[in-house]
Amino acid sequence: MTEIKSHPVDGLLRTDRMPHIWCPGCGVGTSVNCFTRAIEKLEMDLDKLHVVSGIGCTGRVAGYINVDSFHTTHGRALAFATGLSLSRPDSKVVVYSGDGDIAAIGGNHLIHAARRNVDMTVICVNNYTYGMTGGQVTPTTPDKALASTTPFGNFEHTFNIPNLVAASGGTYVARWTVFHVRQLTRAMVSALKHPGFSFIEVLSPCPTLYMRRNKLGAAVNLMEYFKESAVIENGADTRTVALNEGKTVLGEFVNVRLPTLRESYEERMKEALGEKFVPYEGSK
Amino acid sequence: MANNNESTPGDKRKGTVVINEDRCKGCTYCVRYCPTGALEMSVRLNHKGYTLPELAHPEKCNGCDMCGMYCPDFAIYGRRLNSREE
Ligand code: SF4
Ligand code: SF4
Ligand code: SF4
């Protein structure tokens, strides 16, 4: 009997760092599982794929994917990734980080990267809290939910992230959950193929710091909630997809092809400088 | 690793799973989201004290790898056996 030791996606992981740090049932791991399957499906050249993360539980992803990756400062993953995307035009740049990192601390980078249609894919795992730093409130923490910084319940208005990104100019915007593994993997494939700013919000359980504080039970309870409350509306107007109790609108909301930042830049420079303009081929 | 990987002549099984017990954190996703109900949580623990799943009904497993898709810890995967091409 032959023992088959390695997991089929082990080649894409830094297996020397496994088991990873994520808690039992943390959805970040399942999202990464889908991500590795998407990379496999696309048969991507791993030398031309870069994963950039900020800080946080999801921010650890860059350290677990076995490609040249970049673990940056809190909220700044998109800024680093913009530089990388422009200086390596032949590479695919993926930002993989959490709601706190991308929508709160890095919110300004998010709206401008979307506005400029920078050629990158952003995977934003939204687990409604800052996990690693201790369960603080984020712009996506639901109404009245407890966080370490809202001991009497959250009273802030929340971000509808797909709407924020679509309104800012993102050209591919989708939302799935880690319950929807097949759809999420397919969306990752589409996002990775998309030229320009592609964004996927991935709803995911944080059993340790969000669910326990809110007495929501085990991670599977939120998975079941995702299953029961899911309403798939591809092409939905993102103004209507805010997360409400009992209804989780999912799907591919935006998919349009517009000039990327690099394409717009080259077009403008060719117009302005004519023959004198030499397009940047990237650092070697 | 819990293994029962290779099919032998006369083996009717359609698929099986490989479990890397050292990586498992006992979240139960694989058990709950296996479409055929082939897995169950066992009473065995790994070296970190997490309760392990097991292939309780090997005849039900079709190797579809849904368990492998859901596992947050890259600890389990399904593979097909006795596929029609063979
Ligand atoms: S604290 Fe929450 S987000 Fe962080 S690893 Fe644990 S479950 Fe996941
Ligand atoms: S491979 Fe499919 S049928 Fe077999 S245990 Fe896994 S999920 Fe169940
Ligand atoms: S899904 Fe993975 S970590 Fe969870 S119980 Fe199954 S094998 Fe263990």
Image (tube, coloured by chain):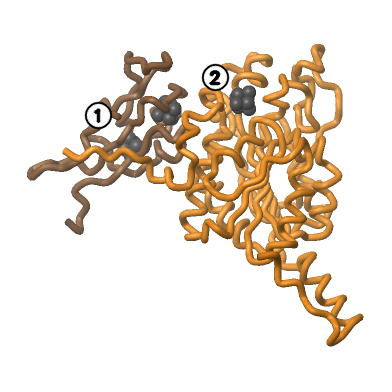
- The colour assigned to chain B within the rendered structure: brown
Q: Is residue A212 left or right of residue A223?
A: right
Chain where mark 2 sits? A
For label 2, count other residues whose C-alpha is less than 10 Å away and answer few (under 14), some (14-19) or many (20+).
Answer: some
Hey, which quadrant is residue B33 in on the image?
top left
Q: Quadrant of ligand 2?
A: top left
- Nearest the viewer among A111 and B15 is A111
Note the chain letter of the orange one.
A
Amino acid type at image mark 1:
His
Q: Residue furthest left?
A: B10
Q: Residue furthest front?
A: A284
Q: Secondary structure at mark 2?
A: loop
Q: Residue furthest bottom?
A: A275
Q: Residue at label 2?
A: A218
Q: Is residue A20 above or below residue A210?
A: below
For label 1, count other residues whose C-alpha is less than 10 Å away and answer few (under 14), some (14-19) or many (20+).
Answer: few
Image marks 1 and 2: residues in contact by CB distance under 8 Å: no
Which residue sits at x=70%, y=67%? A282
Q: Secondary structure at mark 1?
A: loop
Which residue sits at x=48%, y=47%? A12
- Nearest the viewer among A50 and A233 is A50
- Nearest the viewer among A18 and B79 is A18
Q: Is residue A206 visible?
A: no
Q: Residue at label 1?
A: B57
Q: Is residue A6 left or right of residue A229?
A: left
